[in-house]
Image (spheres, grey):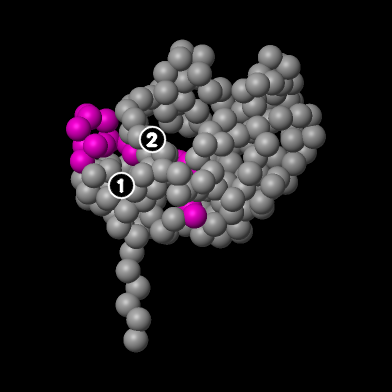
Amino acid sequence: MTTHTHTTSYPVMEHFYTLQGEGYHTGKAAYFIRLGGCDVGCVWCDVKDSWDASAHPQMTVEEIVAAASAHPGRIAVITGGEPAMHDLTLLNDSLQSAGFLTHIETSGAHPLHGKLDWITLSPKKFKAPLSAVIDQADELKIVVFNESDFAWGEQYAALVEPFCKLYLQPEWSKRDVITPLIIDYIKQHPQWQLSLQTHKYINIP
């Protein structure tokens, strides 16, 4: 008989205290935990260094929670890479026990573990999200790289639950071209909202 053991340490590319820059919680203090490992492979990814999990040091759950707890904010954002490649149960539970709301930013390509407080689904064309994750999403964030992404995003907007908030976000390197297109699109499709990477505009992590 085998006993299932939860992951007790994770490959952490970086971790830092900052403001959430995107989506529904923009402007709120948050502790970011960026885990290594990703098999989605977005061509425009701005953290490609995160893809190889073995390139990043392992941190125990206790070390991660202690680092986050050193700051007064009580939102912890688990991101990547693709954080759902890891079993997040122990990390999630330990952060919640320490008083944190746990948020995840995921492509949805892997099952989610743990009862997370907020799920940001940012689907990618390179590896489709699982229907179970689509059903759980609190916000849908479509990164718009070219005009065809509007119709692609609508496919997922039709699948999420009615409570899920809908965001269109320009891909950073094309923001000057894409942002005006998003503004025009939202004016015609007001169920969507604009998400900007405000942390990049104000030059914080």
x, y percentage for residue 74? 27, 35
Magenta span: 66-85
Left or right of 80 in this view: 161:
right
x, y percentage for residue 99? 23, 43
Q: Quadrant of the C terminus?
A: top left
Is residue 148 visible from the viewing direction of this image? yes
Q: Residue at x 65, y 21 (%)?
A: 173
Q: Which secondary structure, mark 2?
A: strand
For the residues bearing labels 2 and 1, Cβ distance under 8 angstroms: no
Q: With respect to residue 200, does 106 lie above or below?
A: below
Q: Residue at x 45, y 44 (%)?
A: 55
Q: Which mark is residue 14?
A: 2
Q: Of the residues under marks 2 and 1, which one precedes in the sequence?
A: 2
The amino acid sitting under disc 2 is Glu
x, y percentage for residue 60? 27, 50
The residue nearer to you, when weighing 62 against 129, is 62
Is residue 119 visible from the viewing direction of this image? no
